[in-house]
Amino acid sequence: MKFCSECAHPVSLQIPPDDNRPRYVCSQCGTIHYQNPKMVIGSIPVWEQDGELRILLCKRAIEPRYGYWTLPAGFMENDETTTEAALRETYEEAGARVELHELFALLNVPQVHQVHMFYRATLRDLDYQAGTESLEVKLFSESEIPWDDIAFPTVGQTLKFFFADLARIRKEGGTFALHTRDVRTPMRQKD
Amino acid sequence: MKFCSECAHPVSLQIPPDDNRPRYVCSQCGTIHYQNPKMVIGSIPVWEQDGELRILLCKRAIEPRYGYWTLPAGFMENDETTTEAALRETYEEAGARVELHELFALLNVPQVHQVHMFYRATLRDLDYQAGTESLEVKLFSESEIPWDDIAFPTVGQTLKFFFADLARIRKEGGTFALHTRDVRTPMRQKD
């Protein structure tokens, strides 16, 4: 940020009165330009048939991480809720209609000023298709997940939490739980 | 937003190529200025003694809702995690050191472009005091909660979820659960 978005005067980094962090401040109109973390919201779309559970992943058609696989997710927009964001991103990136369940993972990524959230979801049908931001959309069973080609560590972590819960539930019963984690590894490095 | 924060040229609302929402776009340098929801993070600081559970509330010394009661909470900052934000806000507003537990409530407030999150917490001691944004900080048992003078509907809702869980746990056992809710009532109206 170089200029005030309200009056076009150059801004400077200053600690405002009654504050303890440097902010971009306009000395002409006085506006303090706060910058805050963004939410990236997505889903874990599941299709279960003949006892086999598979998850829908998208191969990214955009940078960062072009060509790597991800769960459908993207930046939450103003005027929507977290579940609306998850449904929208799942439809935009994977052309998939899902029934959303509980929030499953909340991952802090402070080094890029983001919080990632993933909801469990069930595909309503197999009528999915790659959106403009995806090269390909495909169902993967646990043994087929391309672990070495997952786009972001938060996605790999969420998939690991999911299959660990699934194994526990199949063995002992119980339900899925909310998983929270801070992910401080670089976002473009393999998980 | 009137001017580009990168080059000071006037911006205009346009739907960029490959997008479907109006954004503030700079026709001079091409920057698209995305605007996204912000997170407000706080805690539910609990003190339990002689079988009585009380919750620490702060009387707001700032607008909006000057003079009304709230749980300690505030905007999450860049470079921090959701739990760091909850600890920081609890200390800044209530001068209180807490042990944080699980995320307890996630409330969407789409009409003001916010997501509010509250963590359960236990006060480490009774050495709390009002921060600069609070007039007063005080422990309330359930029957003492000033329900008519709660600052924001998300805070009232979170307190109701908390006491409902507590009643269930005391009666039937079990644990606290994550509560999610969309709160579409005006943020400055009584709950």
Image (cartoon, coloured by chain):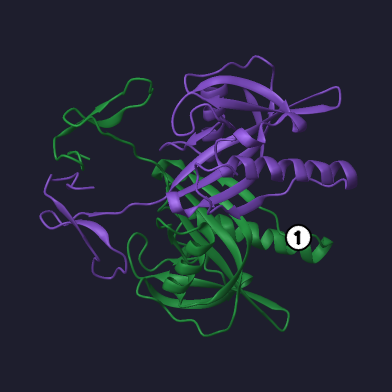
Chain colours: A green, B purple
B191 or A99, which is in the foreground?
B191
Residue visible at 59% across and 48% down in the picture: B106
Place of residue A152 in the rendered image (x, y in percent of width and height, measured from the top left): 46, 57
Residue B88 falls left or right of residue A15 = right
Q: Which residue is mark 1?
A: A175
Residue visible at 12% across and 58% down in the picture: B27
Q: For the residue labelled by badge 1, is the local secondary structure a helix, a strand or a loop?
A: loop
Task: Please determine whether, in this image, residue B182 is positioned above or below residue A7.
Answer: below
Q: Amino acid at mark 1?
A: Thr
B3 or A91, which is in the foreground?
B3
Image mark count: 1
Dividing the picture into quadrants, the one containing residue A163 is: bottom right
Q: Chain of mark 1?
A: A
Place of residue A73 in the rendered image (x, y in percent of width and height, measured from the top left): 46, 63
Place of residue B74 in the rendered image (x, y in percent of width and height, measured from the top left): 49, 34
Dividing the picture into quadrants, the one containing residue B68 is: top right
Task: Please determine whether, in this image, residue B158 is positioned above or below residue A102.
Answer: above
- Confirm whether residue B103 shows in the render: no
- Confirm whether residue B85 shows in the render: yes
Place of residue A109 in the rendered image (x, y in percent of width and height, measured from the top left): 47, 45
Task: Please determine whether, in this image, residue A14 is positioned above or below residue A136.
Answer: above
Residue A66 falls left or right of residue B94 = left
A53 or B110, which is in the foreground?
B110
Residue visible at 11% across and 48% down in the picture: B9
Residue A64 falls left or right of residue B39 = left
Report the quarter where the C terminus of chain B lies: top right
